[in-house]
Image (cartoon, grey):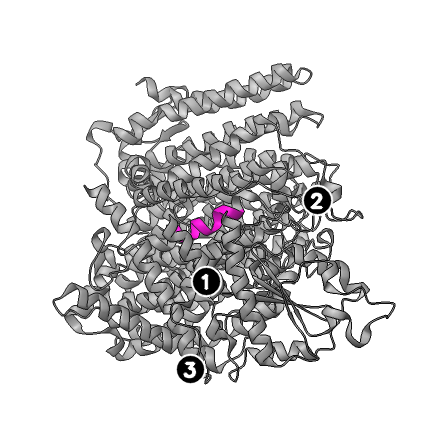
Amino acid sequence: MIVLTTILQILIFPGFLFASFIGLLLAGIDRKVLARMQHRIGPPIIQPMYDFFKLCGKETIVPAAANRHVYMLAPWASLCSLIVMCLFIPVGGLTFFSGNADLIIIIYLLTIPAVCLIIGGSSSGSPYAAVGISREMVTMIAYELPLIIVFLAIARVVGRGELVFSIKTVAEYQIANGALVSHIALIPAAIAFLLIIPAEVGTQPFDTAEAETEICEGPLVEYSGKPLALFKLNSSLKMFIMSALFTTLFIGVVYTGNVIADVVIFVAICCLVTIICMTLVHAVTARLKIEHLFKFYWTVVAGIALVSLILVWAGL
Amino acid sequence: MMYAHFPVIAVMGLFLGAFLVEIFGTKNKYIRNTIVMIFVLLAAVLTFALIKPVMVNGEIITYWMGSWEPVEGWAIGIGYEVDALGLFFGLFCAATFVLSAIYSFRYMDSDDHLGHYYTLFLMLCGGVLGLVFTGDLFNMFIMVEIITFASAALAAFRNYKFGALEAGFKYLVIGSVGSSMILFGVALIYLQTHTLNIAQIGNEMAGNLTPVTILALGLLIMGFSVKAFIFPFHTPVVDSYATAPAPISMMFSGTVNKIGVLGLIRVLYQMFRVMDKEAMQMTLVVIGMATMFIAVTCALAQHRLKRLLAYHSISQVGYVIMAIGLATPLGVTGGLFHAMNHTVFKGLLFLCAGAVFYAAGTTNMDKLGGLSKKMPLTCACFIVGAFAISGIPPFNGFASKWMIYLAAYNKGMETGNFLYIAATIVAVVTSVMTLASFIKVTQTVFFGQLKATNDYIRDVPLSMRIPMWIGSALCIFLGVGYNFVNKTILNPAMNAAFSAERYFDVMMGDPAAASAGTNYTINLSVWNPILWLVLFAIVFAAVAIAIITTKKTVGKVMLSGSDNQDPDGKYAVFFSGERSQYSHVVGSDMFWGFRKNFSKYFDVFHKFHNGNVNDYATYCVVGGIIITIIVFIFVR
Amino acid sequence: MSVLSKIIADSASKSPWIYHINTGSCNGCDIELVAVLTPRYDAERFGFKLTGSPRHADIVVVSGPITTQSEERLKRTLEQVPEPKCVVSLGSCPQSGNVFKGSYSIEGPLEKYVHVDVTVAGCTPKPEAVIEGLYKAAGILKKKREAMKK
């Protein structure tokens, strides 16, 4: 029975089907809102779903220079880790796997999709991919520093005993004491986290690794057909997971008593976060160079996060 | 009581084997290999047989050489004492000997004077195992000397290679500086306590440190730091790692620097028992932080595979030192676990590097590329090792690093000291940088276009692959089953580190009346790798379907560097319409976005590692003096 | 299963991604193609998107009279586009050679190398014409997908 529920959770809610649907929907909303901001009509909101299904119907070409197994396995491994992460996030207050997710594990699970993208791109043997993975890796080093500082700041506020990094502890703390974003010392941390989301997902201006106009989408250059569809899906899933993580960590879950209403409110907040930190930023900025990106994250964003950590440590 | 003889037989067997190889094994390959295998396996079997009494039953095994038992409570003979801590190190060291020996048989096939090679190899093994099991400080020093000389000779074994003799010389000089510091420290301690038995020294000096013993403490920390290759004593070993044959590099990273760590634990926790002092903890944490961060940034700048791995070895030992410096049960557990994991994955990575060298004749990353087509299994093993060292779940590096982060942060929460928070941040960032430099290796060595000049490459023979498979399997097993490992061997070892009184009681007094020692337990149920396994099973089923349903149409494409037209444009790599054979990128200078921002920092460390032995010796002495001063001021 | 393949076939015409090859064009048509994606004409409402790699493309837009230098690159890049794909020739140059016809360095027309599905003539074609051509190509994509399934 437990196995059956686990499989259902993995495949349907909050796993594969639910998360993919919401992720693709968020991607569609992102594109639509962006178009409206630029005075365009924009694609239909379900456009990312069209893209996904179209790519599923395309021919899959594996380049002769590629390592076939790694090349085909990379998107699946990425999807797998993203679904595990979905299970760790309390969507609408529903906790799975006893809710004992640990923030450090989340950090490491978050690196897996990026690593899969890097390994997959690397295995394709393309020179553009080589440049792309180098940038992707530097982006990763860049946002990992502020991310860990933000998490440490949160852990200091909510921490109790052994489970300082547990998401469950964060959720319980917010039920008792209100949203963390209202905690004055954590406001810089929230801002830093919002700035990390675009780099983590890879949207403008931090899409240096996948710059389609200069290095032909970097690591994805050789991918076509189903693996490409999976990578696009993964990117949407990441969008959902990052915004959901922000919601969980800083805003918390709104309890209305009705499960469906809870989930809807949760998704609505995710949507708002996506629009604020991705669409707005995307609409008004141009792509950064990689060394500027690195400098930005290690000085500005890490600085903001550090301010928060120091404030928290000073007992504010 | 039968167990009491096991450690000494294991150690003596290895030394006996060294002589037998020199006498009988210089001519015939089969006799030589048989002798080596017999004694190495004997050592491993005897060591593993001790798991039951020591780890499970919680005994401490003692053995007095020549039955020179203590007289009136004073140790006069050489005593062997195997507690859970020593055995823990002994286990993975013995496993490393076996894998390294199996790998050597084929890898060293084309060299001559192999009789001397295996003599030195067995001396090195015997030295390591002797140091792990010994309970006598002077015996420890002797073993350190044996290890140093065997290592220096083995580092320079392929003396026809460029830089090999230089590497051996550097190792010898810096190693001798370390050894003489240890000798000086031992002499001072003997002067003060009139005994050389570690347990008794610990008892004599407990709460009773004089200026002379504090000087000895500084000297011993410095001496064992040189053996553990931590910053700033790491400078000579990079060359040794790079020029030594791959199985010996594996021995260096798996055993030789681990005995430095063991030495530090013995000195700090069991002899001087100063780890409850905050200054000492902070000193070790700072040293660990500096080691891990500086070494990993140096690794990012390397062009040669084995030098890169060497810097990572240093960096990972930084984690261990930091974790031990935390002096909390969780921290020490994490540190010991990371020491073991480092042995496993770094050994695996060195073996893969050796396989690349064996197949391609070079480890220069600018000259390699596309080897995953020719050596797919080596590539797979390397990726497993790379993920493990970068701490990607569910491999073993993740479990231990995670314990270290948690321990460091909890320590910070308890003490309110910001240093431990900084340590957590540095540890996480170092881990990501480790990943970056391994991505660079996989990209430049295993992926990309295969060069036409490398078309002759074939995968390595079976006897070299088996150790790599075992290493990969261990990486996954230790990561998924970390709770099991924690219960069976880590927990006793950690408690042994904290139970110095028990160590003394069993050695000198009546084992039955010995104090029980500490009984900490670490219970980490948050991270559940079984969940991952279920998920991976589902995903792999899906992938199998996906791979079966896709048509296997792979075109033929020319190799990079050849001049012919490519016959099949569709399956060629997209290179803006250019022919794909011109598309090879040498990626050794990847991550310039990172390096550009840190160019000044890199300049400093470029000058720091200037290759001058005099300077390196100066760094050692200066580092040692600083440590001694810190110890003098703060640890009284 | 048939529902899924119907969804896939329907999606084929609703998300056409464009890859643009310039084979020696005077840049006029290229500018007009980019103009199609600007707020004024907004081809993205039909799901059109400019991609960077031929591996991602459904519609290959070729502009320019195909010079000797670009011939080999053009052929290789066209081969690298996965099926189902459409080829659109943009402007008069790939169709006839236009004013460059007869030059020693011109290897056109495009028809010589690949089956052209849609031709948008004009020097340069108006953005409205370009959109119509691309939209027709998207319709052809769906038919090709259905044919491919059989």
Q: What residue type is labelled 3?
A: Arg
Task: From the top left corner, tell me how far across and down residue C38 is, in percent.
Answer: 54, 81
Please rate how many residues cluster around mark 3, counting C-alpha atoms within 10 Å: few if below 14, some from 14 to 19, many from 20. Answer: few
Residue to which mark 3 is pinned: A36
Q: What residue type is labelled 2?
A: Glu
Task: From the top left corner, tell me how far across and down residue A184 is, in percent.
Answer: 27, 80
Q: Which of C64 and B260 is in front in this view?
A: C64
Chain ID, mark 3: A
Q: Distance between the residues labelled 2 and 3?
A: 67 Å
- Return the mark for residue B166: 2
User: Residue drawn 50% across and 56% down?
Assistant: A228
Chain ID, mark 1: A
Q: What stretch is highlighted in magenta?
A: A71-80
Residue to which mark 1 is pinned: A51
Left or right placement of residue B161 versus residue B301 in this view: right
User: Residue drawn 42% across and 28% down?
Assistant: B78
Please rate how many residues cluster around mark 2, counting C-alpha atoms within 10 Å: few if below 14, some from 14 to 19, many from 20. Answer: some
> Which secondary structure lies at badge 3?
helix
Is A181 located above or below residue B102 in the figure? below
Residue B567: say if magenta. no
Asked which quadrant contains residue A49, the reply is bottom left
Task: Report the residue that reaches farthest toward the right.
Answer: C104
Task: From the top left corner, tell me how far across and down residue C109 is, in percent.
Answer: 76, 65
Is A170 located above or below residue B23 in the figure? below
Chain ID, mark 2: B
Q: What residue type is labelled 1?
A: Asp
Asked which quadrant contains residue A217, the reply is bottom right
